[in-house]
Image (cartoon, rainbow, N blue to C red):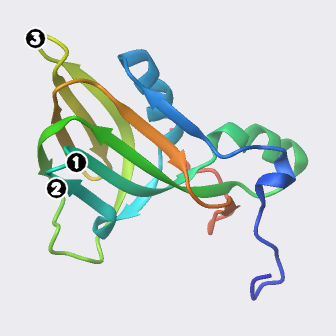
Amino acid sequence: MTDSGTEDARFEDGGERPLNLGAMDADDLQVISALVQDAVLPVTEIRWQKSARRLGLLVNRVRWEDVEVAQRSGRPVERVQSVLVIDHVEGVASQGVDRSDRDMILQVLTVAWEPGVDADGHVVLTLAGDGALRARVEALEVGLRDVTRPYVAPSRKIPDHGA
């Protein structure tokens, strides 16, 4: 129980299982992109393991797969912590991401694939506020795995992009 007297959501409540998805092509990546839209993360939760050729981000994502059910039942929107992993990374570049600002919070807008000549290319994470992460990869392989139980989103609302 929290101080407000509400209880954290549980996987069992919705009969849902944690997501564990992989993307090996652009169509698969579109699914992952939709699921991490509006995910937030502190800049400190980005790890590039150069020797393992892996870029990992620990994100707090909206459970988009559950939003309709939550709305119908009148319960608040949930978030869940998930690990977004990009494999076969040969290099990483960023724009608008100040790694020295340890209080910086990033918001993911999209994850896209920019194909190269062969199987190589770039996985590009577009961030709110004109930020971006661009991973040069030998081949497209991206994973998304939920690593915590869902919890009620602090705002208790679906992110609003305005019209």
Mark 1 or 3, nearer chain start: 3
Q: Position of residue 35 (x, y in %)?
A: 53, 38
- The correct choice, above or below, for 152 with respect to 26 in the image is below
Reading the image, the residue beneath label 3 is 117
Q: In the figure, residue 101 lies in which quadrant?
A: bottom left
**Label 1 with label 2: CB-CB less than 8 Å:** yes
Reading the image, the residue beneath label 1 is 130
Reading the image, the residue beneath label 2 is 96
Instruction: Report helix, strand or loop for mark 1.
Output: loop
Which is closer to the viewer, label 1 or label 3? Answer: 3
Answer few, some or many: residues within 10 Å of disc 3's Cα (few below 14, many 20 plus, some between 14 and 19): few
Residue closest to the eye, 156 or 148:
148
Name the kind of residue labelled 3 in the image: Val
Name the kind of residue labelled 2 in the image: Gly
Name the kind of residue labelled 1 in the image: Asp
Residue closest to the eye, 113 or 104:
113
Mark 1 or 2, nearer chain start: 2
Mark 2 or 3, nearer chain start: 2
Q: Any mark on residue 122, and which? A: none
Answer few, some or many: residues within 10 Å of disc 2's Cα (few below 14, many 20 plus, some between 14 and 19): few
Instruction: Report helix, strand or loop for mark 2.
Output: loop
Residue at (16, 66) in percent of width and height: 98
**Label 1 with label 3: CB-CB less than 8 Å:** no
Q: Position of residue 71 (x, y in %)?
A: 80, 45
- What distance separates the C-alpha of mark 1 from that of mark 2? 6 Å
User: Is residue 30 visible in the rendered structure shown here?
Assistant: yes
Q: Residue furthest bottom?
A: 3
Q: Position of residue 109 (x, y in %)?
A: 39, 42
Q: Position of residue 1 (x, y in %)?
A: 80, 82
- What distance separates the C-alpha of mark 2 from that of mark 3? 28 Å
Residue closest to the eye, 51 or 115:
51
Relative side of 128 to 6, left or right: left
